[in-house]
Image (tube, grey):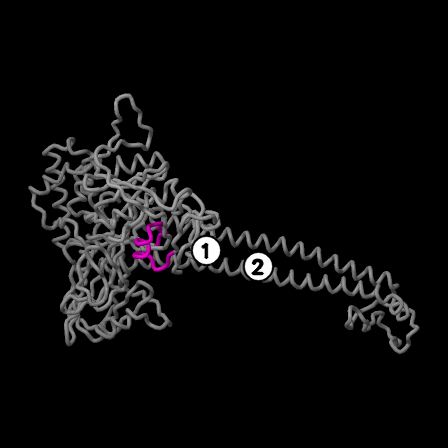
Amino acid sequence: MKESLDVFDIYAIVHELKQYEGEYIEKIYQKDDEIYIRLKKEGEIFIKNGKWLCISKYREESKEHPPAFAMTLRKYLKNGKIVKIEQYDFDRIVIFEIQKEKRYRIVCELIPNGNILLLDEENKIILPLFYQEWSHRVLKPKKTYVFPLSKANPMQISVDDFMKKIGKEKDVVRDIVAIGIPGKWAEEICLLANIEKNLKGDEIDEKKKEELYKSFMNLMNRLVEKKFSPVIVEEDGKIIDVLPFPMKRYEGFQHHFYNSMNEACDEFYHIISSKIHEEKRKVEEERERIKRQIEQQKEAIKKFREEANRYRKEADAIYANYVLIEDVLKGRKENEIKKRKHPFITIEIPYEGSKLLIELDTRKSVFENAEEKYKMSKKMKDKIKGAEKALEEAKKKLEEVKIEEEKKEKKARKKYWFENFRWFISSEGNLVIGGRDAKTNEKVVKKYMKDSDIYVHADVHGSPSCVVKACDIDGNPLPINEQTIEEACQFAAVYSKAWNNFSMAQVYWVYPWQVSKTPQAGEYLPLGAFVIRGKRNYKKCSLEIGIGKVMIKGEEKIMGAPPSAIKKWADRWIIFVPGNEDKNKVAKEIARIFGVSIEEVQRTLPPGGLMKKEEKI
């Protein structure tokens, strides 16, 4: 199911939004990472950070005080005139230019880990929705705004450049993606050209290249000529996509056509978000019902325990005052017993230094009255057992609801390829990955290490093979500096056997061309092992690991990283060093603090006991 807009969607949406140029802004609202810009004439522009943008009719009223970002937008933009709306460089970035006494810009980055920013006329950031920082750009007030690193613009590619690109990547569909076409549309181009998307470069002749270019141009021309036919695609009663025009891949699926792309996108987002909200509401209602049940059982147990104690105490008091009770029951103390039709009487007797009110049955003996009290005490204890059993069942149900919710969230949460390995984002923004075992050590190097990357390994048994990528998580090129190398070395040391035995470890880094699977004559290399040839660059690393919750492509993830990296990217974090505290106990506590599953935390922890060094939670 579609979660965010691609460049084709945005192109169509921005074309339609052009009709709002010249309109005035009446008010701006914010709910979490969603912004609504109400226009004076008609309509509201809806922006979901990093994912969505369209004219919407579905804003929910909020009684909460507007956040600082919304208040800042109101301060600068209320009554401002929208003079220009544009898509930046055929990318997932939309810019609104607004004129008041001065000219301002709202930049909407509809990309993973994106942002919404208010800029002044000098392109300085007045305020971003989130503060962010990379080696190549800093999104903070008073900083000059720098656009994210752009991919190729397919609107500007020549036929010669297109032909040269085909055959450069692993397969043809990746060749087309490399020129700036979204993956889904790259597959569509292959489908329209009747060419298998997994064909490799040497399997594509000139004729096939021409067919691909023809399909590519037909698709791009349809965009440029604004031949839109907005549609929501449905499969088995569930909506799965929204498009500016139908795709061949969805032939045979149910289609719902709309008058505009904005209307289609608004309906699509509303249907999806409504279902999510309804599911959450039902889960929350069930959770609250079980919580009430738990509280009721706790109250019942408390009441039964008090009753059991009271009956036992009364029975003990009867035996402690046997003669007195016997006299009362025989009517020898007439001042305490008066003629009455009711067989029950209440008397006050001394017990353990105080007075105790006890109800007696005048038809029974002292022994029978005491035994009746003991019997009632036992009955209350039996009720306690039943209530405790019901309490445990309710707690189990609550845990099942929680686990089921976590499973749904996990399923809904996109898993990225690097999550199959150990990973972290360096303080400069580079992606660093490492193996979890021999098999993934092999895969990290053979499949993911490129010529521009760096290989890192500790001189300790069990160290993961780590690769420092010369790019960020989106594949945008990034230089590898000394700070990133030091962090990667520390990362490799932490997840080795050194964690259990030392406080420091020796780690080296080399270039990819120095790493080989070819052993010396007569030697054998097991799975996950490599031969290093040439000079090794050693670093001495302290054994420390930080655990925190970071925002990755608009989603929260638990990341294990060197302290300098975790402090850079996480608002809340805990730093650990080797220690005696049980790993599973630590994982449970971290999971509670960050509101995630224990399993998710365990994947970030080193192999052994831990001790907390510092925290910011």
Magenta region, residue range = 556-573
Q: Which mark is residue 294?
A: 2
Q: Count the numbered circles shown.
A: 2
Q: Which quadrant of the figure has residue 527?
A: top left
348 and 153: which one is in front?
348
Q: Which quadrant of the figure has residue 357?
A: bottom right
Tell me the crowding category of disc 1: few under 14, some 14 to 19, or many 20 or more residues within 10 angstroms, Cα based: few
Q: Position of residue 19 (x, y in %)?
A: 16, 65
On the rendered structure, is 388 left or right of 287? right
Residue at the location (29% across, 51% down)?
A: 2
Q: Position of residue 253 (x, y in %)?
A: 29, 45
Dot 1 falls on a residue whose secondary structure is: helix
85 and 115: which one is in front?
115
Question: Does the segment drawn in magenta span residue 458?
Answer: no
Dot 2 falls on a residue whose secondary structure is: helix
Q: Position of residue 448 (x, y in %)?
A: 25, 39
Please say whether residue 200 is visible from this viewpoint: yes
Q: Which residue is mark 1?
A: 592
Nearer the observer: mark 1 or 2; the answer is: 1
